[in-house]
Image (cartoon, grey):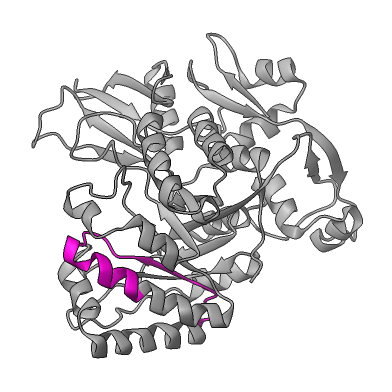
Amino acid sequence: MILHVVGPGETICSIAAQYQVEPGLLASANGVAGDGRLAVGQALAVEKVRLYHVVLPGDTLWSIARKYDVSLRTLYRNNYWLYGNPDIYPGQVLIISYRAGDRPPIFTTSYAYPFILARLLSATLPYMTAMAPFTYGLDKDGDLRPLDDERLLSETVRLGAAPLMHLSNLTEDDVFSPERSALVLFNSEKQAELIAQIFSTMERKGCRGLDVDFENLPAEQRVPYATFLRTLHSRLQGMGYPLMAAVAPKTSDDQPGLLYEGHGYPELGEAVDYLLLMTYEWGYAGGPPMAVAPLPQVRQVLDYAVSVVPREKLLLGIPNYGYNWPVPYRQGVTRAVSLSNQEAVALAVETGTAIQYDEKVQSPWFQYTDRDDQRREVWFEDARSLTAKLELVKEYGLAGCGFWNLMRPWPQGWTVLNGTFAVEDPSW
């Protein structure tokens, strides 16, 4: 895979000619708009095809997969524009394989809200080993709050990923509540009731694993939380299903702050099969403009994590979004709005703004003036920043990565993932 940075005067056609690839394929793989307009400084992922197949009358996606000894998921990943749909037509050109070099296996997971667009969900699930609908929170009595996730779970199974149940201490007001988690962590009877509800729900809905995300836990909940996860793990292990837990991005064991104190990496790493490091949100809505996941800070978290947790249990958290801030920043006043990576590029194109790339934090950004004459600053993710993060997965020998989340389209991101790693199918 080649990463090309758009220069002045370059077009999709001129770049495609430079690398001897098909312009439509280059545009589709990078989510370029139909008008083909590019921004100076925009990064493009260039993949060269090794083998095509022209669909013949009577061909089906299944027969083509058998002919070339590849999986349906591979065909979906190599042809994002199928959007996870098996319908094909004579004359259609499908990519069987790219000229990518050796691609090591990777475990990938992500999340989606029940209202995700059907086509977006289907397009991205082939790139996931597992997926968890977000979320089963806790009510004021410590019982499971319901979730309308049947459509998501069904589609996850159809496209060959493992459906997970996601459990959190999120309230009806979308707040991670230490009071809700305390209801089940310090009351053995209530905890037993919750565990019964969890496994009843998993059995009824066909979930093949559990992902737990208790956040904002004070120090006194650290040990009870680990004990709770060990109890869950013991039962899941007997079923052959994995247990995951998401943790705040810590750089030391005694890091202060409500976000960190209840997450003990050593004991949580011992209690679960996978630990998802939430290595994002340094740049956030209420903070100053900066990269969402600056690489030096991500490295600090990884350096600590691998010192206390087996590497094969660790998943690197990767953001699938950016932020747009008004500038200059005023603490307590300025609020950014989130946007997709595609929207960020489209904004640069629309305003005729050149995209910059910060080599230190490994993230793209730009400034522009909006229609109200307000200066604004945007930080987001692109092929370069994602490649840098995926290289960390290789460098540190991690099990894989977890994307937050699938709600925003990012074909370029999946192109980069597919060109760097071979996404694992679930083995359970």
Establish if 212 lies above or below 93.
Answer: below
Residue 331 in which image quadrant: top left
Q: How many marks?
A: 0
Rendering coords of residue 271 (x, y %):
42, 68
Question: Residue at horizontal 21%, vertical 62%?
Answer: 217
Using the image as rendered, state which of residue 226 and residue 171 is in the foreground. 226
| In the foreground, 311 or 196 | 311
Q: Residue 315: within the magenta?
A: no
Task: Residue 139: give x, y in percent of width and height.
Answer: 22, 78
Question: Does residue 264 appear in the picture of this structure?
Answer: yes
Q: Residue at image x 69%, y 53%?
A: 76
Image coordinates for residue 103, horizontal then vertical, percent: 71, 41
Residue 279 picture quarter:
top left
Residue 198 lies left or right of residue 312; in this view the side is left
Above/below status of 111 relative to 207? above
Q: Determine the residue positioned at 44% across, 57% down.
A: 275
Magenta residue span: 205-228
Residue most extreme to the top: 8
Foreground residue among 304 and 340: 304
Residue 212 in the magenta stretch? The answer is yes
Look at 34% across and 31% down and name the residue there: 291
Residue 37 visible to the viewer: no
Report x, y in % for residue 288. Answer: 20, 30
Quadrant of the image containing the C terminus: bottom right
Check the picture and name the quadrant holding the N terminus.
top right
